[in-house]
Image (spheres, rainbow, N blue to C red):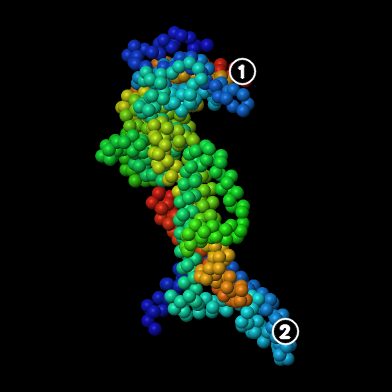
Amino acid sequence: MNANPAIRQEASSPQTSQPVVEAKGLGLTFETNDGPVRALADVDLTINKGEFVSFIGPSGCGKTTFLRVIADLEQPTAGEILVNGMTPEEARRKRAYGYVFQAAGLFPWRTIEQNVALPLEIMGYSKAEQKERVHRTLDLVNLAGFEKKFPWQLSGGMQQRASIARALAFDADLLLMDEPFGALDEIVRDHLNEQLLDLWARTGKTIGFVTHSIPEAVYLSTRIIVMSPRPGRVTDVIDSPLPRERPLDIRETPEFLEIAHRVREGLRAGHGDD
Amino acid sequence: MTAAADTAPTRTTTPVFRRAVEGKALPILIVLGVIILIWYAFTVYLNAPWQIDAYERAGTEWTATDLVRDTMAQERPVLPSPHQVVAEIWKTTVGTRLTSKRNLFYHAWITLSSTLLGFVIGTALGVLLAVGIVHNRAMDKSVMPWVIASQTIPILAVAPMIIVVLNAIGLSGLLPKALISTYLSFFPVVVGMVKGFRSPEAFQLDLMRTYNASGTQTFWKLRWPAALPYLFTSMKVAVAISLVGAIVGELPTGAVSGLGARLLAGSYYGQTVQIWSALFMAAALAALLVGLVGIGQRVVMARLGAKP
């Protein structure tokens, strides 16, 4: 088992030491009709500013639940968690993060620009500023020219890009993404992964990314959190030695394959009981 | 004849013909034709006994042709023939002064006005109740059973009581009748809008939560637009039963005008032709109202980016 404290220490390397998310002994137990279900148990984790952290594991390992706890969409039942030094609820009220769901979930009655403007309307930005920000973020996700289209006129990949633009439109430094490309085909996914890295490099956001694809996790992340189910817990934390600049063919290199191998080992170890 | 005159008819008739064949027009016309044929057959069958009786009393010789002709021209037939009904409708609409109390349009207007008033109140009431049910747990538990129970009571039993009670507190005229329409029409709107307001997916509500959106913002930016398709579907049902409510409201109250009054008067005096023409006027009115709601739906949905 590689999940020893030394690795975690390494993770909080000196140049990016400002913590965005700090979880200590975090646990969450759902009360269901079939008795309690432990979705998270004893999770200790720190995400630092500017990191790209992926959560990987089989379904039921609590990776999505952990992201939802950060977003104040679920309440932990044990331990503590701070987001930007605040409770998740305070952070949510201060609009500290943008959240991208697995489904793009664009409102079908709104055009693309109106969809991206949705959070801005709610947060009370002026009309002029809304316009400027919509323009800027649509540019960022390469959707300039599609402002007046309705969601159904766009492909699945484009819709998901619009939903990323929606999460980026306001000034949240933290981007939480819950299997955002899970429903897309391989080719579109590769393309969007490349664009996401580019976007991350340009904006310097901190990104928490849930996935169940090993290549996706290894390709994108500076740190990979491997989780296992029943109860959901962290089994391995892998710091990626890959450079920040990552062309797609980096996936053929020995370093990449070595990390992918370690992730796979971690997943297998977590699955030892079945 | 010139070449232009030769080609002109084909150029205009071909698309019309093709539309009729490919579209809905032809099947509808065929069904209509079959219905009219069956209707004529029943006209002869149902009116024949009385007619044969009449021949025998008068001692006249009669043939099958006579029978068919005469069964379609009785003054008080069991079942009037289609052309008798058409003639009656024509006579009482186009053939009569519009302001006259014998004009069917006049009666249709009386019924229409209380239909519309009742429909508007019913829709508003339905939407408000749905908002309450969706946003308030206590209302969700307590109101919905009553809403359903209200519709199990036969409207014919309730209608006279509504009219009497409202009269006793000084309300008469249009409003009591309209309230009977309201009583029927709020129901599909409540049911439809509760479903509509609940149609956003859990993650869309979560999304609004991540923006720290207020309840009002979530309602107007997510729940309301998501419910609009449900609103129009419910309104189509509501407007049709509003008309039924208005007609029912005219039956037990001794009303002298309105389509319901025409139906009642017709049945008092055995004027079957009058009953059937009032029925057809009511059906046409219902089709018109549902059609208008449908047009409103298409206009609003197009503005909201629905696929054409």
Q: Amino acid at mark 2?
A: Asp
- SS for callout 1: loop
- The mark found on residue B105 in the picture is none
The residue closer to the viewer here, B10 or A138, is A138
Could you give the CA–CA distance between mark 2 and mark 1, rounded to whole angstroms? 93 Å
| Left or right of residue A252, residue B275 in this image | right
Q: Nearer the viewer, residue A34 or A131?
A: A34
The picture places residue A115, in percent across and down from the top left corner, at 37, 40
Note whether residue B76 is visible: yes
Residue at the image position 40 percent from the left and 75 percent from the top: B8
- Quarter of the image with the C terminus of chain A in it: top right
Determine whether, in the image, residue A271 is placed left or right of residue A167.
right
**Do the residues under discs 2 and 1 have CB atoms within 8 angstroms?**
no
Write down the quadrant of residue A163 in the picture. Answer: top left
The label on residue B53 is 2
Q: Is residue B10 above or below residue A82?
A: below
| Residue toward you, B306 or A256 | B306
**Residue B114 in sight:** no
In the depicted structure, whether residue A149 falls above or below residue B90: above
Mark 2: few/some/many CA within 10 Å (<14, 14-19, 20+): few
Residue behind mark 1:
A273
